[in-house]
Each structure stands twice: as C-alpha cells, then as structure tokens.
Image: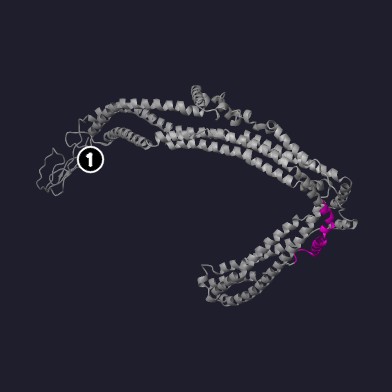
Amino acid sequence: MNYLDVSVTALMISHITRKKRIKIRNTLIDDFQRLNESLSALIASGGEPIVQHVKKITGAHAIDSFLNISNEAQELLKIVAEDENELKALNGELFLLRNELTKLHRTSVSELDDCINSDFQLVKKHCQEIESELSDIDIITLHLRQDILNNDTMNVLKMLAESNIAEIFVDAISDFKDGEIELNKKVQVKEQAIQTSVREIQSELLRIADTLSTQLRQIKPELLHNLLKRYMGDNYHSIVQYTWYASLTLCAIFSLKALYFLFALCYGCFGRRPSDYRNDCCVRSTGSKLFVCGVWLAIILLPMIAVLTASLLLIGVNAYSLGCWPLDDPFARPDMLSLSERMFDAWRSKQIEENLSPLMNQLSLANVIRSCMRNETLYHILAMDNKYHLYDLRQYGKELYDRLELNIEDAFSNISFSKSIATFASPEQLAMLHQIVNITIESNIPLISLQIKDSVEQLEKIPRLISFIEDDHAIENLPRSVQSIAEQWRIFQIRSVNPALLNAANALKMLNELNDRLERITLPSVALSAKLQHAQVLLSTNLNEYFRVAADQLVQEMEQQIRKYIDHVRIQMSTNVSSCVPLFNIAKRTRTVLCQALVDPFNGVWASMVISILCTIPLIVMGSAASALYKKKHPYPKYIVNEPGNTDGHETSGALVTDSYDVRNKQQKLIYPNSSYAMYFGYPPAYLRTRS
C-alpha cells in the first residue's frame, strides 16, 4: 500500500461531490429548461394542437387519413415503376448469363470426352464426376417475373393517386388552417405573461441549485490529499526502503536458524558414524556441532524475537480492532463510534455558517449510518428539505406555480372561431371515398423474391464446380485440357456470376423494403366515411364549443407537464441525486486500502513469528538430545576395506589395515576345508562387504 491509495479515496470523495453538483444542476436547471421549451412550443403553435384535438373529438381526422393514403399511393407508384425497371435490367442480365453458361457447358462437355475415355481409372472416375456436376448446372433456369403488382392493385393505386382527395377537402383544410392562424394570434397575446411566470420559477430554481452547489463545495477532501502528500509524499520511498531492509534482515535470521537445523538433521541421517580411523566432515559429529550452533543461535535470538513479536502483535491487533473492525460493523464497536462522534463534533465546530454545518448541528453520526443502511438519501438525512422544499415545489412555490397556471388558463380561455368550417365533401365524393375503402392491395413480391433466391442458389453451384475440378489430389493427374476448364469457369464466375449475384442481392433488399411499405399502407375503414359525415354535422352546429373543449385539454396537458416535472424533482432528490451508495463504496475502498493492503499483511508477519517461536522451542529440546546422540562413537566401528590394486601379486596390500601377508609370488592354490573361500597368489581375496 502507498499513500496514493488513500489519496485516491480522497479524490473519489471530490469526484462524487462534483457529480452531485452536476446532477442537482441537471435536475433543477436543465430539466426545467426542457419543460420551458415544451411549454413554449405548445404556446407558439397553440392553434395547431387545438385544431388537431377538434379533429380527433369530432372525427374530422379522417380527412388526414385519406390525404395520407393518397400521398402514399403516389409515392408507391413511382417506387414500383423504378423497381420494375431494376427487375427488367436484372432479368436481362440473367438471360445473357444463361446463354454464356450454355456455351461454356457445351465446351466443357466436349473437353471431358477424351478424359472419360482414358485408360487411367482414377482420372476417368474423376472426369465422370465432373461431368455429373456439369449436368446439374445445365438445368439452371434463370428467369424472374417482372410485374411487382398485379393489374387490380395497380388500378387501385392509380385511382388513389388520381382521386385528387386534396382537392375534395381543399375548402375544409383551408378553414382549419385559418383557424390555426387565428388561434395562434389570440394565444400569443398572453404569451409574455406566461414566459414571465416561467422565468420567475427558473430564477428560484437557479438560486436553489447555486446554494446547494456552494455548500457541497465546502466539502474539501483535497485537504486530506495535500496532507498525505506533504507528510508521506517525500518520505514514502525512504520508509519503504528501510522497511524492506528490516524484512530482509529478519528473513535472513530465520533462514540461518532453519539452515542450521536442516543441515544438522541431514548430517545425522545420512552421515557416517564417527570413528578413530578415517574421519572427515561427512560424519554425524558434524551434525552434532550444527545442532549446537542452531540451538545457541535460537536461544540467543528467542528473547529478542519474542519481544519484537509481542510489539508487532500489540500494534497489529489494535490497528485491526480500532480501524478494520469498526469499518466492517460500526455498531460492533460503540467506543470507536463514540470517538468518531466527538471527532465529528470537533470538525463541525470549526465550520463556517455558509457550509453544511447549520444543517448538521443536531445530526448524529450513528443516525447517519443507520439511515444509510436503510437506503435513505443524504437530502433526507440532513433534513435539507426544511430549507429547500424540493420534495414539493408546488406547495413551496405555490404563488409562482399558481400564477403560471392562471396565465396558461387565461391564454386559452377565450377560444372561439369567427367563421364556420366548409362542407367536407359532396354526397358523390363521399360515395367515391366509400368505394376506395373496399379495395385490397396485393403484390407479387413473395413470388419474385422466391425466384431470386432460387436463382442465387443455382448460381452458387458454379463456385462448387470450380472447387471440385481443382481438387488437390486429382488435378495433377488430369489432362491439360480438363485443367483449363476450371480456368474458364473461374473467368466466367468473376466476369458474369459475381456481378449477377450482387445485383440479385440488391434487388431482394429492394423488394423487401417495398413489401414493408405496402404492408404499412392501410386504407381507411368504412366507418371513416360515416365519421366524415358525422363530423361535418357536429362542426356545423356547435363549432366553438368543441374548440373550447380542445383548448381545455391543451391546458390540462401543459399543467400535467408541470406536475410531471415537480414529481421528477422529488424522485431525483429522494433517490439518485443524494444517494448513500457512493459513501458505502468509499467506506469499502477505505477498508480495503487500510486493512487488506496494510493491517492484514502486518498481522501475517507477527503470526508467522509466533509460529516460528512455537516451533523453535521443541527444536531446541530435540536438537540438544540429538547433539549428544550424534557425538557418541560406536564401540565396534566398521572395518576399512583396502581393495587390492591388481591380481598378479605385485604391489598389493592386505584386505585390512591390520593384516599382513606374504606377498611373494606363490602360484599354488590353497583350499580351506569346509569353506568356499580360497587364497590366490599368497593373500586372501578382498572383502566385498563391511562387517559390523
């Protein structure tokens, strides 16, 4: 762990407070600005939504339905004509491709005749398989239907396009447009009063946002960062360096002690017994000496290590108890919670009146923790609504919001239309419209799409044919004339097949888009014709009443938007803007930095030292006993066998250092009775094993 980990936690607090300020400004300023823009748009075009409401109430919106169908029919006729031209071009391309394919197939079959009559069975079999593949390609049929729509559907679209529905309703459309203009002029007279009320509310919200942002800026975690940097930034590397040296020294001491006992044990287990004849370092007495050194080293270091372990244990356990445990469960250590309360009171007493301290004079740290555990917001915990009243802006700014709603109602109060709406359509025209709605639209797009997909599948046989001819195991054995077939088909694929496949894919996409558009076009139902007649009667008898009803609905819509914004502010302040979740994350990170990166490894050090001390005591006892055991000499040491240098009797010595023999050259062979041993050349044979 380094001081940067703690400073990052401090910077996280700064980042969170900055995000809180941004969210507050977004909620109180940006979101209200969007509300202002929506209200301004409704007021600026107040005549249009009122007229649309009138059409919807009376059923006159059937006019717009008929107009949309007419315009869509005109556009569809243009699109269908363009798409049919594309299909004609694609069909001609496929026809030329089919002719080229037939010629190439005929040439390929003639080239394969000699190969089929070959004497080599492997070559003959492969050529027959190629001919079979070519027969599948010969049956390819490439033809597309060119009429996208049948005659009945084309006549329907032409009738819709040529019906001049716009001319039928031209007078009614003109009267509705004049009504929009007239209503806009009446509403815009009162627009200034509405904008004044909106600006007053906006100024109040801006003041609240600035006040909250100013108070949040008083939380300055940068002070902790600067303090850490001042006291640890320059000395951190030196602290780490000396700590590293101390750790290496401690590890070296424990390693030396462990090596003493390890080597002593190895000498005792694998060394020779000590004797008075031929001793070296590889005897058990060396292990005894190492045990003595290890025991004395352990005895000398044991008090110092015990004192050091006790000190580290005292520091580590208290650090965990005072820091990590309260962070895991604050209420498990009421003493530390009380200490934190006193520190919090000391910090609060030093704050100036412009910051958050007036809101926290009666605040308890324990209550803050409990409230955060209940997922309450800081805005509620600090009781900030008593000052800012963001939970119910309507009640707090009752005068401002009442004035705004009153100005909106006043702007749309005297809505009336000075003239009547013209007759929608004559009885003959209504009969013609009734005839239109009995028409169904059908197309040949599914059939053409199926033909295109089938053509694509057939053309995809050509790349498979080329791959089959160019088989790695067979092409080397084929005649040159057959190998050239693959080259011809590949040239044909690049020059003709690939462009045709691309054009087919584009045509398929074009047809799918046209089909989607045809499916979206909906002819008015028979009931709409009746609605037109009914709407004409209603608007001719009580026109201004329907306009007033539509104006009231628009006023209610605008008031609903204002209420939605007030509820939006309440929800944001009670959930997202001042959530306690970031504080929990900071506490979790602080616990990770302090405990997992510092306290836990520190406790691991003294725990390891305790284990070493517990293991050292039995090692001292066993080492002392083993040292005395390894010093003892065996009463009957093993013989030292001296093997003879040669077998001819010259320059030899006895089998044992105490034996002496006549080394003269004696050729006779002596046989010991009742024994299998023999003497050759005047001396006994060498001992092949030691005697205990």
Is residue 612 shown left or right of residue 378? left
Note whether 215 is above or below 528 in the view shown: above
Residue 620 visible somewhere in the drawing: yes
Which is more toward the observer, 323 or 91? 323
Q: Secondary structure at mark 1?
A: loop
The image shows residue 393 at horizontal and vertical percentages of: 67, 33
User: Going 61% across and 40% down the picture, which residue do you hit?
Assistant: 26
The image shows residue 465 at horizontal and vertical percentages of: 59, 68
Instruction: Identify the image quadrant of residue 76.
Output: bottom right
Q: Is residue 168 on the magenta stretch?
A: yes
Note whether 97 is above or below 384 in the view shown: below
User: Going 27% across and 30% down the picture, which residue do you hit?
Assistant: 294
Question: Magenta stretch?
Answer: 147-175
Instruction: Identify the image quadrant of residue 265.
Output: top left
Residue 597 visible somewhere in the drawing: no
Is residue 523 shown left or right of residue 24? right
Task: Residue under label 1, please give it.
Answer: 689
Is residue 666 shown left or right of residue 2? left
Task: Bin the neighbour count of mark 1 within 10 Å (Cα to Cα): few under 14, some 14-19, many 20 and up.
Answer: few
Q: Is residue 200 on the magenta stretch?
A: no
**Mark 1 is on which residue type?**
Arg
Which is more toward the observer, 515 or 689? 515
